[in-house]
Image (cartoon, rainbow, N blue to C red):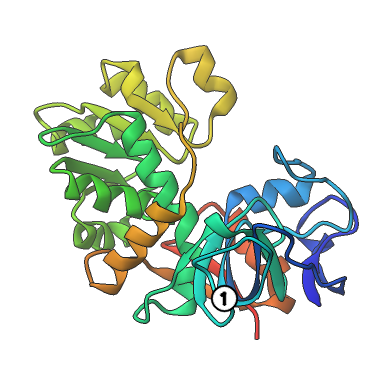
Amino acid sequence: MRAAAFATYGGPEVLRVMELDTPQAGPGEVRVRVRAAGVQPYDLAVRAGWIPSGASGELPGIPGNEFAGVVDQVGAGVSGVTVGAEVLGFGRTQAYAEYVVVAADQVAAKPAGVPWEVAGALTAAVQTAELAVDTIGLGRGDTLLVHAAAGAVGGAAVQIARMRGAEVVGTARPENHDYLRDLGAVPVEYGDGLVERVRAAAPRGVDAALDGAGGAALDASLELVKDRDRIVTLVEHTRASEVGVRTVQGERSAERLARYARLYSQGDLKFLIRRAYPLAQAADAHRDVETGHGRGKVVITID
């Protein structure tokens, strides 16, 4: 099969299309012919040398932990998933390839109204966002501050918080402010004076914060939120323990993924694809994500 893989760790340039052995589905597993795979900072860390828990670390390595495609092989003992089923799912790595094998309980049916690009890039955003919202116990009447609110996780978090009856203030560059308003957030600009702008946007105060940017964004959250148990950072994992804030807790699930795929298909969830790259341009997709800016999600498509 073709895969965007790396034989050595390094920058985006180490990613190239290789011909590798096609994986086979074992007991309890399914093999999916991939149509689209989301790109996220997790994948960039894998390419640079980080080995996730449960991953082999063998080279050549294939990044990608979210995907959508068509089931083409079902292992022994699997029920409820059949060959030909259109699915979206998640793993640890291996998704930037024509075929990926995962446990059968890591895929969910793709609703007909969900495009392949959205299906392939949905899981990391919506699952991370809901787990973060659950971690801080967000509820009706709360005001949530979301940093990097125009990104995929941030945009999902804004909408999930609004579904739960919370008010949301979101930080983003000015060109993304109309987008945040469309999602239901009050936008504020990054940079000097951020704390004062947030206080003006939320005169009753901020009850909780989701930090998707780190650095000054986390500093602002510490100043604005009284209870540090209600601050979650997605990026400052080392610093989190030092300052007493939380990181995302919980596990991904096919049930959660299916629920948000249905919401998207019904028009109740917005999910923006910033750009789709073909498999041969996986390195460019990584460069795009490495900028740290941009609205929505980057995805790789595989013909």
Q: Work out which residue is located at the far front of the displayed protein and give it.
A: 77
Q: Position of residue 191 (x, y in %)?
A: 38, 39
Q: Is residue 199 above or below residue 107?
A: above
Which quadrant, please, contains the C terminus?
A: bottom right
Q: Nearer the viewer, residue 245 or 11?
A: 245
Q: Residue at x 36, y 55 (%)?
A: 150
Q: Looking at numbered disc 1 in the image, what kind of residue is underneath it?
A: Gly
Numbered circles on residues, count: 1
Q: Residue at x 50, y 21 (%)?
A: 240
Tag 1 residue = 69
Q: Is residue 277 above or below residue 162?
A: below
Q: Nearer the viewer, residue 299 or 290?
A: 299
Q: Is residue 148 above or below residue 183?
A: above
- Kind of element beneath mark 1: strand
Q: Position of residue 187 (x, y in %)?
A: 24, 49
Q: Residue at x 59, y 63 (%)?
A: 78
Which quadrant, please, contains the N terminus?
A: bottom right
Residue 191 shows up from this direction = no
Q: Nearer the viewer, residue 15 or 175?
A: 15
Q: Position of residue 40 (x, y in %)?
A: 57, 55
Q: Residue at x 78, y 68 (%)?
A: 24
Q: Position of residue 137 (x, y in %)?
A: 27, 29
